[in-house]
Image (cartoon, rainbow, N blue to C red):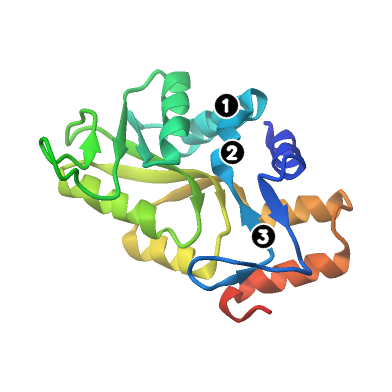
Amino acid sequence: MYQNQIINKLIDEKIITISPEKSFTYASGMKSPIYTDLRLTISYPDLRDWIETDLANLIKEKFPDVTIIGGVATAGIPHAALVAEKLGLPMIYVRPKPKDHGKGRQIEGRFTEDDKIVLIDDLITTGGSVLDAVKATKKEGGNIIGVSSIFTYYLPDARKNFEQAAVKFAPLLSYPELIKKENESQHITDEQYAALNTWHEDPWNWK
């Protein structure tokens, strides 16, 4: 519903930066023509509302049986809270690891084995952190029916990891959609578009 507005705002505010000629280096060592800082989205009320409205609609469409929205700490928590509010559903959140004090909880909020939980994160690269949250929730008896996110690079590693974990994944926006829109709007040339696609096909060997 708000896809074009979301993409335009992400680019205009440099929350997502596309740079085909000058790459960024991730913590993993991967070279990339795109950099995202989706934590900044919470600072823009209009963008925030567009994202949560579209996420809520996406989750209703892809996971109609959902009974609880979960946030992956820390970046997924504010979006999960707002989506849960829009859907009128309870919320939980999952830490990267259990607390080292108190009751040692890794998951905050209440759920039962009969609940159907959808976890939200802001960005999915390989899916590692959110799938760790899935495992932690399942270990506590939670039933995860899917994962959603604001954005994903949709890298081969991510597709493989979600398939192996048998977890359904429904992102709001993806890298292929983003660069296609940017090419159609002539913000990037056909040559740049081709280079950006090359990275997506084989990111570890891209230069």
- Residue closest to the far left: 103
Q: Please, what secondary structure does the residue beneath circle 2 have?
A: helix
Say which of marks 2 and 1 sits in front: 2
Left or right for 59, reference 13 = left
Residue 147 percent location from the top left of the image: 41, 46
The residue sitting at 89% across, 53% down in the picture is: 186
Q: Please, what secondary structure does the residue beneath circle 1 have?
A: helix
Label at residue 34: 3
Say which of marks 1 and 3 sits in front: 3
Q: In the rendered structure, which disc, 2 or 1, sits on the residue that comes first in sequence?
A: 2
Label at residue 40: 2
Using the rendered view, name the quadrant where residue 166 is placed.
bottom left
Left or right for 56, reference 99 = right
Say which of marks 3 and 2 sits in front: 2
Q: In the rendered structure, which disc, 3 or 2, sits on the residue that comes first in sequence?
A: 3
The residue wearing badge 1 is 53
Type of amino acid at the residue the image marks with label 3: Ile
Residue 28 percent location from the top left of the image: 48, 70
Using the rendered view, name the quadrant where residue 202 is placed.
bottom right
Q: Please, what secondary structure does the residue beneath circle 3 have?
A: strand
Q: In the rendered structure, which disc, 1 or 3, sits on the residue that comes first in sequence?
A: 3
Residue 114 percent location from the top left of the image: 19, 33
